[in-house]
Image (spheres, rainbow, N blue to C red):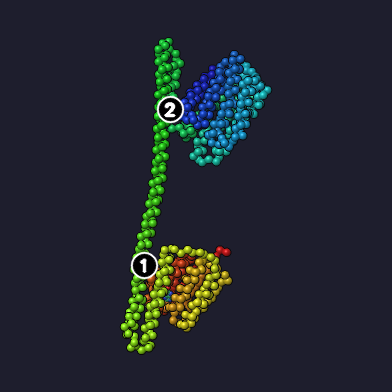
Amino acid sequence: MIVDFFLVHKVLIFLINVISVYLFCIIYFNNTKSNISRIFIVMIVLMLFWVDFAFLARVTSDQSSLSMFFLKIAWFVTPIFFLSLYFFTIYLIKESHKYRFLSVAVFLAGTIISILTGLTSLILNNVRHNVNGLEIIYGQGMFLFLISIFFIICSTLYPLIKKYSRISAKKKIKIGYFLIGIFIFYFANIVFNIIFPLFFNVFHLYYFGDYSIIILLIFTTYAITKHELMGIKTLITQTLIVIISIILLVDVFLLSDDIVIQLSKVGVLVTFLYFSRELIKSVKKEKEIVKELKSAYRKINHYIKRLEKGNKNLEKSNQRFKELLEMKNEFLHITSHQLRTPLTAIRGMLSMWYKGDFENLPEKEKKKMIKRILVSADRLNNITNDMLDTMELEGMSLKFKFKSVSIARIIKETIDTLKPNFDKKNIYIKLKINTKVSDAEVEPNYIRQVFMNIIDNACKYTKKGGVSINIEKDDKYIKVIVKDTGAGISKVDQIKIFDKFTRGENAISENASGSGLGLFIAKRIIKEHKGKIKMESEGIGKGSTVKIYLRISNN
Ligand code: ADP
């Protein structure tokens, strides 16, 4: 049974040593500059001291003073190993700055207990050889040792678990392996090194607590290789180098009688190590070049995206520019036509007057002719005003200053201004306000212009009856409904009535001086107010209704 145990010990010790050398080489050749790599290397060295000297103490258990010496070294190193594991952890999770006080406390606890263990017999009193091998006689201060280790364990787990609970799923896998390794290591340590020997007097399983470190190493290795805990990518190269180095090293230790052969063995090893170093350097360089290329690629991609975006904007501006140009041409074309008609009429009549063609006409006809000149001049005036408004709206040079105003008040004022026109035509104008408050969020000057146009149209296109205006309100809007008993509009005309320079079929006979811009302007202004405007009519001769919806004020 004992022999079996020894065999297991030997195999485990061998495995631990090989894995440690392997890990040492990987980290040493790769990433020695970062804090975490340095600590990992220290950890490996400390762990080897601990495990190997504990093994030596067991092997020499029949020579108590030598065994005690080895055991003291192992125990001296143990708290320092726990200490290094703590620092490895907080550097791994990148939170060393957060736990400054805890780090000082852990450092003090670890070093003090380590010195006490190594230099006094307070913790390790003596060793005895019995049938199971080595038996340890603990000193009075053993509990101090246990408390210190327990404190360091808790201080390591606390930041690690806290961080683990807060990180992304991807990073969780990486730190997860390390966490599992650390848990198994701590658990085995507490069971085999503390509970079994202290409470059940079972010493022969003691070393399995120490050997559980191999599990921590395996998990950390897995985390390093599979999930690039330290950014290692040149693993295959290094694995081969390490294996060959171990073989060459073993070969060197298999001493040969021939000095030349022995020297050449050493020479081969040294040369191999030198070239390996160069190889790893070149692999690292290659890795850096790839990294640089990747970042350059990312940058180029970024610029391409920006260029594409800029191009799109340019295309959009170009499109808008084309639209504006088209609009300008269309505008010039229509306006020249619109202006030419009344101007030609004015010019024709004035030239007749100048030539004396009016002189022979009776007084009544003369007046008729002058009235026609006035109507054409009026039309010219209306068109010019409307065109100026349209140009302003198209160019968006207007700045709307919205404020809460009473729509009822604006309409009353508009009616007052237009009342003489209604009286002249002998038609009625009625106003009904079905709401107490009619405040809406508007630009008063423009809204006044809209109502002026709509009510004036209602007057212009009505011969009999009159116009009734209702002001209502719902959750969102103040509604102004202008209903007349006038000319009405055909269904076909209703579709295009809000377009630029569009006049209805019977509009010209009803009112010659219109520009066909009034409703277009009104619609643009209402749109700027995020309101609605529509025109309804049952048909020609059946009157029309204009509905305007304006957003209610919030206050
Ligand atoms: P204008 O009145 O100067 O012709 P508008 O843009 O104000 O231009 O109106 C466009 C057309 O809509 C008018 O020519 C007319 O045919 C029709 N219209 C507007 N209001 C009324 C109304 N109350 N009754 C009948 N037709 C109307």
Quadrant assignment for the C terminus: bottom right
Looking at the image, the residue that sits furthest to the right is 140
Residue 498 locus on image (x, y percent): 41, 69
Q: Do the residues labelled 1 and 2 touch (CB within 8 Å)?
A: no
Residue marked by disc 1? 331
Residue 192 visible in the shown view: no
Comparing 82 with 462, the one in front is 462
Residue 474 locus on image (x, y percent): 53, 68
Q: Looking at the image, which residue is at 53% across and 24% down?
A: 45
Residue 308 locus on image (x, y percent): 38, 49
Give the alpha-carbon distance from disc 1 to disc 2, as whole Å: 78 Å
- Element on which disc 1 rests: helix
Q: Looking at the image, which residue is at 40% across and 40% down?
A: 296
Give the number of the disc on residue 238.
2
Q: Looking at the image, which residue is at 51% across and 70% down?
A: 479
Above or below: residue 448 compared with residue 132: below
Q: In which quarter of the image is residue 509?
A: bottom left
> Can you tell me whether the CB of the residue at mark 2 lies under 8 Å from the nearest atom of ligand 1?
no
Near mark 1 (Cα within 10 A), the count class, few <14, some 14-19 or many ≥20, is some
Quadrant assignment for the N terminus: top right
Q: Looking at the image, which residue is at 50% across and 37% down?
A: 173
Q: In the rendered structure, which amino acid carries the disc numbered 1?
A: Phe
